[in-house]
Amino acid sequence: MSRYIGFILFFVLVVGSWAQAVSPEKVGLHLSFEERLVLSYALLSHNETPEAKEAILKKAMSYLENSYKIPVKTVEVRNFKEFLTLYKGSWPNTHSLALDVESIEARGPKAASVFTSKSARVQKQIDSYQEWKQAELMKMMDGDLNALDMEQILERVQGAAQSQSGRMQIARALLQFSEGMLDSKMAELDHVGEKIAQSNLAAQQDATMKIFLQTMFTEYFARLSPASKKLIVSSYLGGDLHLSDMKKFELMVQNSGPQLQKLLQVVARQADLGPEMLEVFKGLENSVRPVPWEQVEKILKGKNNKFDFTYFEHKPLGVGTMAQVHRAKVMIDGKRHDVVVRFIKPGIQARVEEDKRILQEVAQILDANEEFRKTGAPKLSPVVQDITDTVVAELNQADTVLRQKLASSRYEKSAFLKSAQYKNDLQFHVPKIYDGPKNSDLMVQELVIGKKLDKEIAPYKEIAPDMKRLIVEEMARIWSYEVMFGGGFYHSDLHQGNFMIQVTEPKIIVNILDYGMGGVISKEMQRQVMLLGAGTELLNEELIARAFWKLSDKSKNTITESYFHQLIMAKVHNIRIGYEEALTMEKWTAFAMDLGLRLPYEFVSLNRGLVIVNKLLADAGSSLTVTELMKSMAKKNPQVVYRALVLEEKLSHRDLIKLGWSEMKEALGFKLPEAAINAGAIRCEMIFN
């Protein structure tokens, strides 16, 4: 990919030079703003129709011609760092190369700059760097240009660099010449992922992961649209042109679609990856591309976004895969409020559709791979569908607003933390939503103060070593109760990035954020989840199969009920005889989906939330799990459990006793004779009189 920018060497003769402070290799080979722009025009025209190419060329020449009319600007720099920043300039970095160029054109022409320094040392660095850069670019060109190509370009360059018309001739020659080189260089994108997956950097002991990585990276990038590939190449042009294959791959991953990024984040949490690959995947959470201010301004000026902002911070407060938030001040009912403004990223819908198409195709390839299936890996197609459903749901900001408003009535709770060393009140809070114009693209909510859990509690580790565990356990209790014994509301992405902690003298405040993922399960689903939990605990194939089948979308299942029941029975048998390990409820869910059961989005999303809350508990050093919390709550809500499991789902009294009936019977307000327990003879009127 990197060598095709070699021809930019000749443009260097026109637009100036720059330097490296000590070692050029450590800073790397970078393009100036003007060089990158010329190449971006060429990239934009790549593989377009002749008419489109001509239109792009005309726009490029018009912009460059207007720029050359402006006298060259001499810029004095104090050090190399300042020089490097000014030399590279301010690039829009939108989610589209076309939008990048459009944004630059909207700013108006920009004069070329010559950089100087009063420091003889810095000036020498600039001069020596120019020599190094020219030599490096020439090396990169080697093999890409034949003697005839070189002769044609040199003819245009010689004697032309000193005049405006000469500079225009060079720019036109480079734009036209680049087309022949870009074909092979763009094609390299199709093979970088495969090369990484097959290299020692991605070597895996796990056969499942090895096949997954090789297939995913070989097939995904080869299927990307030209526009998406151009965005990846454009990002590459904005950095060091001497990137290693692994760094190129990292850029590709960072500029991939939202579903692939979420899938790789899941892989990073669960797979045994090499350190370099793991770093790339985990870095996705901190390297999401922000929407530039030029685009944010356009959103704020939208006809449905007429909030009375008195201040709006240009730098994002947070950037996610799907949305972005900014700090602001707004006038509402004559009062000024400190707020956070959230919006869905422009153009993300197109990337969601592209990722859906590509990942479905790749998933089908993997699911049909006999070697992959032999490893015991679950089918990938249901996982891809689940991730896509989640991403699509997150695109609907109106639903996010409704979920957050509902959360305020569910998660606004108080508790008391007490350990041997520490006592304090705990307050859970959901930021208030400020309603604005109908159909607004903006979600305006109360600004809350706090930090991530680990950072906020760090100063208190000595005096309150249990603080983290106690906070997380209390939050898990609220989450679990609302799911099973409350209104069925759940937040399905409750990781540390989605809540903020503020430790104060009167109390600890936990602000629960980001309701882009979540929902409400019905009473019917609550009952089936309860039944599934009972079946899992008892290892009862009839209960497990019945609960899953009732939960499923029967019109979309690709397996019959009887065959599904047989496979569940076989699985339970293998577990009982010790041939297979016992499964948690979330692993039973993955198994059922792999068999061809189509479970509703709400249940799958809830299952994801359960996994994330369990991980929070484990990371906090807690011995509790969501399942254990729900079991303890069931004992405190015996009438609800009895009505759901015994009266409606016909669970036998004997099975209910196995689940802990002996502890629940006293909470029901009567004493059950031992003989009745053994016989399972419990009359309904004894409970509900």
Image (tube, helix red, strand yellow):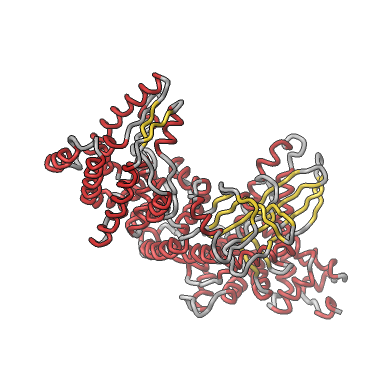
User: Residue 150: x percent and y percent?
Assistant: 16, 40
Position of 559 relative to 25 (above/below): below
Residue 79, by quadrant, is top left
Viewer-nearest residue: 437 or 622: 437
Compared to 293, does 665 lie above or below? below
In the rendered image, which quarter is residue 215 located in?
bottom left
In the picture, measured across the screen, residue 25 lies left or right of residue 636, that is left
The residue that appears at 37% across and 23% down in the rendered structure is 123
Give the answer, above or below, for where 9 lies relative to 205: above
Q: Is residue 540 left or right of residue 101?
A: right
Residue drawn at the location 42% of the way across and 33% of the way down? 84
Q: Position of residue 422 (x, y in %)?
A: 81, 41
Q: Is residue 243 visible?
A: no
Residue 584 position within the rendered picture, expressed as x and y whole percent measured from the top left: 60, 60
- Please give the name of the residue rendered at 87% of the width and 71% of the height, measured from the top-left corner: 670
Q: Foreground residue, 31 or 280?
A: 31
Query: Which x, y percent locates residue 608?
Result: 58, 60
Q: How many marks?
A: 0
Please name whichever residue, 247 or 193, is drawn nearer the observer in this view of the structure: 247
Quadrant that contains the N terminus: top left
Residue in the picture at 83% in, 69% down: 674
180 left or right, relative to 618: left
